[in-house]
Image (cartoon, rainbow, N blue to C red):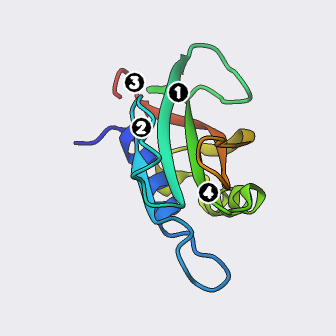
């Protein structure tokens, strides 16, 4: 059985795969969940998005307005989404991803809230004309006491 966190991450992947541009074409040729290693950009179909689940913290006290609930543990964790592609406008991709993830901030009912935390655009100098960005989302979810 998948954990709450795994369900949230899978929901983000499914959401990214479903994003289309104004002409109805998928904006990503590839979406993958990664653990630690960066992908080999020379062999990846572009544009692409990679989801890096990051730090998770158990909230002991009331934090950021997240009220405790009897019999539940409160968790915050971060997800970094790194996207890149040749001749793309990173700001357009930021908007596509932000708008898509804002449609269901509860991530299919597994999260209490999903909020964009930060964004950093950058270029990949070793591959000409390749733009990229990293968007970090902060996700708050609850689990049954002492469950994952």
**Which residue is more in the foreground, 122 or 19?**
122
Q: Are marks 1 and 2 in contact (CB under 8 Å)?
A: yes
Q: Which mark is residue 75?
A: 1
**Is 85 located above or below residue 72 in the figure?**
below
Classify mark 3: helix, strand or loop.
Answer: loop
- State left or right for residue 131 relative to residue 27: right
Residue depicted at x 72% and y 42%: 122
Closer to the chain start, of discs 2 and 3, is 2
Name the outermost residue toward the left.
1
Cα separation, mark 1 vs mark 3, equals 11 Å
Q: Badge 3: few (under 14), some or many (20 or more) residues near its Cα, within 10 Å?
A: few
Name the outermost residue toward the bottom.
23
Q: Which mark is residue 145?
A: 3
Classify mark 1: helix, strand or loop.
Answer: strand
Q: Which residue is mark 2?
A: 5
Mark nearer the viewer, 1 or 2: 2
**Which residue is more in the foreground, 6 or 92?**
92
Classify mark 2: helix, strand or loop.
Answer: helix
- State left or right for residue 104 relative to residue 143: right
Closer to the chain start, of discs 1 and 3, is 1
Q: Quadrant of residue 95?
A: bottom right
């Amino acid at each position: 059985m998948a954990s709450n966190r795994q369900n949230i991450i899978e929901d983000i992947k499914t959401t990214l795969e479903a994003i289309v541009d104004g002409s109805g074409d998928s904006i990503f040729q590839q979406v993958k969940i990664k653990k630690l290693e960066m992908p080999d950009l020379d062999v990846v179909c572009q544009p692409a998005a990679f989801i890096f689940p990051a730090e998770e913290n158990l909230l002991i006290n009331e934090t950021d307005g997240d009220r405790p609930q009897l019999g539940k543990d409160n968790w915050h964790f971060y997800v970094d989404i790194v996207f890149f592609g040749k001749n793309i406008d990173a700001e357009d991709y930021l908007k596509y991803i932000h708008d898509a993830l804002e449609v269901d901030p509860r991530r299919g009912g597994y999260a209490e809230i999903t909020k964009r935390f930060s964004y950093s655009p950058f270029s990949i100098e070793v591959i000409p004309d390749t733009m990229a960005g990293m968007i970090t989302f902060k996700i708050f979810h609850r689990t049954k006491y002492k469950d994952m």
